[in-house]
Amino acid sequence: MRKIFIVILLSILLACNNSEDVPIVDLFKTTQPIIHKIFDVQNGLPEFLAPFHLEITGNTMTIRNLFMSEKMFTTIDIATGRVIKNWGEKGQGPNEFQGLIDIYYNYSETGLNIWDSRTLKLYFCSNSNLESDSVYFQEIPITMGGLERKDFFVVMRTAVQIDTSLFFVLAGNGNKIFTLLDTNSSEKKEIGDYPSEDNLNNKGSDLHTFHRNMAYQGRIRYNKSLKKLVYASRYSEMFEIYNVDGTNVKLAMGNYSTIPKYKEIVSPSLGRSVVYEDIKNGKGRNLWLTVSEKNIFILYQDYSKKEAIDVDGTVKEIADMVLVFDWDGKPIKAYTLDCFIQTISYDKTTNRLYAIHHNPYPEIIYFDLE
């Protein structure tokens, strides 16, 4: 009887050890090489002065340009490669853009959502307007529900709409990572615990909210049909999947093989602050996120690739691996790309991943998936 008990106990201990998170890249036994193709743009190529990211919405792709470009966005017809329009004014006036922008396919797949983190405003441009010469788009009113601008200036890098009145924001106003905003009730609900390994988890300084939120920046995307959210940290391998039932949002799974690495610095002149480090924090980090109905695609930066590290040791914003998971967090496939890119966007019509490639000048490329 005693021997049986010992065997059972050892089995339990081994199971606990095996349940520890491993580097997400090690969840895949093999990687499949994949070769890019160039997407031909029929007109307007000189307008692409500084493209950063593109997003596929229906029959169009919209490119988010950086601030040195004349316009904020460029929209292209995917079928023909024709540039439909360059649009989006930069400035401080009504419906002008100022800050770091996140663009994503609207939850209802009827158009493009645009989040301006500087003004804390969310906009919507319908598919029909994207496909026309019209530059009309509308603001989606968000009652911030107690979220103060002074607390979230720059920090709220993304706000994802998950219903007509529900918005999931990557920024907490307390000891949580996210905030759910309900514009019907003008209420907010804080969601998502910081990992237990977070070394500033219990210090309670008013500085920690801002700086920890900065360290946990990343991307959020929503799957309406499955009612699930995915979050991928930008400064680690951490990613989480949440089940969504109205305002009831619960963690379904999480990978914490690495979490954002940061530390508190006390300076006599600057006071207390927190800095974060993304280099040598495990094997790599999540760089970007895109989703389909069935899968989650994480653009993964492998620190062992010399192309990913600059001569001074700083980490570049490029990667050449895509890790594919299902919406339960199960690893499906890993792709090794034949070039380094910054962001990705999935097109369900063609089953492709689109990206911007600098070679050295920017070009639009795509990868055909199986």
Image (tube, rainbow, N blue to C red):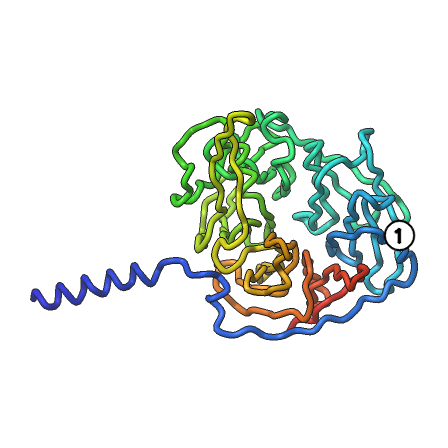
| Position of residue 239 in the picture relative to residue 293 (left or right) | left
Q: Quadrant of the C terminus?
A: bottom right
Q: Residues within 10 Å of mark 1 (few under 14, many from 20)?
A: some
- Residue at 47% from the left image edge and 66% from the top image edge: 26
Label 1 is placed on what type of residue? Answer: Glu
Q: Quadrant of the N terminus?
A: bottom left
- Residue at 87% from the left image edge and 43% from the top image edge: 135
In this picture, is 83 found above or below 194?
Answer: below
Residue 230 visible at all: no
| Position of residue 315 in the picture relative to residue 177 (left or right) | right
- Residue at 20% from the left image edge and 64% from the top image edge: 10
Residue 101: give x, y in percent of width and height. Answer: 71, 42
Q: Which residue extends farthest left?
A: 1
Residue 283: give x, y in percent of width and height. Answer: 50, 60
Q: How many marks?
A: 1
From the image, tell me which residue sits under label 1: 47
Residue 301: name its quadrant: bottom right
- Residue at 61% from the left image edge and 58% from the top image edge: 309
Residue 59 visible at all: yes
From the viewer's side, name the closer residue of 370 and 256.
256
| Position of residue 10 in the picture relative to residue 189 (left or right) | left
Tag 1 secondary structure: helix
In this picture, is 353 found above or below 137?
Answer: below
From the viewer's side, name the closer residue of 27 and 328.
27
Residue 363: give x, y in percent of width and height. Answer: 80, 62
Residue 361: give x, y in percent of width and height. Answer: 81, 60
| Position of residue 12 in the picture relative to residue 211 (left or right) | left
